[in-house]
Image: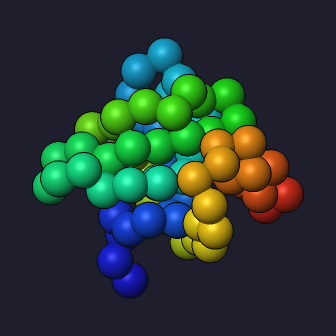
Amino acid sequence: MPAIEVGRVCVKIAGREAGEKCVIVEVIDDKFVEVVGTNIKNRRCNIAHLEPVDQTIEIKSDNVEEIKKELESLA
């Protein structure tokens, strides 16, 4: 299972948003990804600050609100 991939649901383990669920929307390089979540802004995040979980979301569009709704439906 590739842990860091587009659509992978993760939990932030560092920073002010620690404990919040997010989903990877873009892999920037080997250290950073772009994430979005219900309580997390669309931002760049260090891979070391993420804990991947077994769930994935199929990213159909770049619409951040659609991605947030789909993440909420998993919980």
Above or below 7: residue 19: above
Q: Residue at x 80, y 49 (%)?
A: 69
Give the color scheme: rainbow, by chain, secondary structure or one colour: rainbow
Q: Residue at x 64, y 43 (%)?
A: 64
Decide which of 67, 47 is in the foreground and name it. 67
Decide which of 62, 6 is in the foreground and name it. 62
Q: Is residue 42 visible?
A: yes
Marks counted in the figure total 0
Q: Residue at x 65, y 48 (%)?
A: 63
Q: Position of residue 31 (x, y in %)?
A: 17, 47
From the viewer's perspective, tell me whether residue 20 is left or right of residue 32. Answer: right
Outermost residue, bottom side: 1
Q: Residue at x 35, y 34 (%)?
A: 44
Outermost residue, left side: 30
Q: Is residue 47 visible?
A: no
Above or below 60: residue 73: above
Q: Position of residue 9 (x, y in %)?
A: 56, 58
Above or below 15: residue 59: below
From the viewer's perspective, tell me whether residue 6 is left or right of residue 47. Answer: right
Q: Position of residue 55 (x, y in %)?
A: 61, 70
Outermost residue, top side: 16
Q: Quadrant of the N terminus?
A: bottom left
From the viewer's perspective, tell me whether residue 18 is left or right of residue 57. Answer: left
Q: Quadrant of the C terminus?
A: bottom right
Which quadrant of the figure has residue 19? top right
Which quadrant of the figure has residue 40? top right
